[in-house]
Image (tube, rainbow, N blue to C red):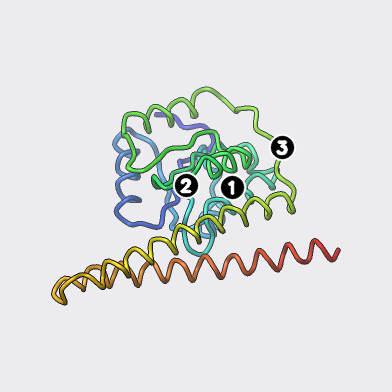
């Protein structure tokens, strides 16, 4: 199969999901490169110009929103088609923000393999789509702040539910939910740290 310009770049921080997507694409003959977060993806794009980027949204180091904004802000990468992948807790506002960033497809996990491969084939054969103008820095960070605040509320709700559940369970059932609680708390702390950086950036816009 001839792929224009370069391989497909898959960006995903969950190893088994990354492996599944890579194997699915390779089985159909597509050349694939992978990355575990947005920063690693940008580093790989410096050396290879992918024909398509398929990225998760919520990842450590650099998430899919920042990756998309970086790609759209650079004339060299602006026209690369972008598929967003996300879990089922995505909101219509998350979806709309992804479209404003230039995502040409938005797919929920778990991925429907047939629909996924159909979307990939369409994007690789139909030529460039008319994409929206890249968001300005202030507009991007405002929208990004709203999405992170939503994630933080969702994560805090998860933590509260898990804590309530733990208080009702016998000791021999605690280990699994203790691990889930620790992971959710780590996720919350990462989101809060990112939000704090966004608040600082937006404060700088106000002062300028």
- Per the rendering, the mark at residue 55 is 2
Classify 10 Å Cα crowding around label 3: few (below 14), some (14-19), many (20 and above).
few
Left or right of 183 on screen, residue 54:
right
| 167 relative to 149, above or below | below
- Cβ atoms at labels 1 and 3 below 8 Å apart: no
SS for callout 1:
helix
- Cβ atoms at labels 3 and 2 below 8 Å apart: no
Q: Residue at x 15, y 73 (%)?
A: 170
SS for callout 2:
strand
Measured from the top left, where is residue 22 in percent x and y? 34, 45
Left or right of 193 on screen, residue 180:
left
Residue underneath mark 1: 68
Q: Residue at x 52, y 51 (%)?
A: 64
Q: Residue at x 62, y 69 (%)?
A: 196
Residue 201 falls in which quadrant of the image?
Answer: bottom right
Q: Earlier in the sequence, mark 1 or mark 3?
A: 1
Measured from the top left, where is residue 3 in percent x and y? 46, 32
Residue underneath mark 3: 133
Q: How many marks?
A: 3
- Considering depth in this image, is 4 or 11 the residue closer to the camera? 11
- Cβ atoms at labels 2 and 1 below 8 Å apart: yes
Measured from the top left, where is residue 26 in percent x and y? 33, 39
| 129 relative to 195, above or below | above
- Per the rendering, the mark at residue 145 is none
Q: Earlier in the sequence, mark 2 or mark 1?
A: 2
- Considering depth in this image, is 84 or 11 the residue closer to the camera? 84
Q: Residue at x 49, y 29 (%)?
A: 124
> Distance from label 1 to label 3 (Cα)?
13 Å
- Considering depth in this image, is 85 or 185 the residue closer to the camera? 185
Measured from the top left, where is residue 142 in percent x and y? 68, 53
> Distance from label 2 to label 1 (Cα)?
9 Å
């Amino acid at each position: 199969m001839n792929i224009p310009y370069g391989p497909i770049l898959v960006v995903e921080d969950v190893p088994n999901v990354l492996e599944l997507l890579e194997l699915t694409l390779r089985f159909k003959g597509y050349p694939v490169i992978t990355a575990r977060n947005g920063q690693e993806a940008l580093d790989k794009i410096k050396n290879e110009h992918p024909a398509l980027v398929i990225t998760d949204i919520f990842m450590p180091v650099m998430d899919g929103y920042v990756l998309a904004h970086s790609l759209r802000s650079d004339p060299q990468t602006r026209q690369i088609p972008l598929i967003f992948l996300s879990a089922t807790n995505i909101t219509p506002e998350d979806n709309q923000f992804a479209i404003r960033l230039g995502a040409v497809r938005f797919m929920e996990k778990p991925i429907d393999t047939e629909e996924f491969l159909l979307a990939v084939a369409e994007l690789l054969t139909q030529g460039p789509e008319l994409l929206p103008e890249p968001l300005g820095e202030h507009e991007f960070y405002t929208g990004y702040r709203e999405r992170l605040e939503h994630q933080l509320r969702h994560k805090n709700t998860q933590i509260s539910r898990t804590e309530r559940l733990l208080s009702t369970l016998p000791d021999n059932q605690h280990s699994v939910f203790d691990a889930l609680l620790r992971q959710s708390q780590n996720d919350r702390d990462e989101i809060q740290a990112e939000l704090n950086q966004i608040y600082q950036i937006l404060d700088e816009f106000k002062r300028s």
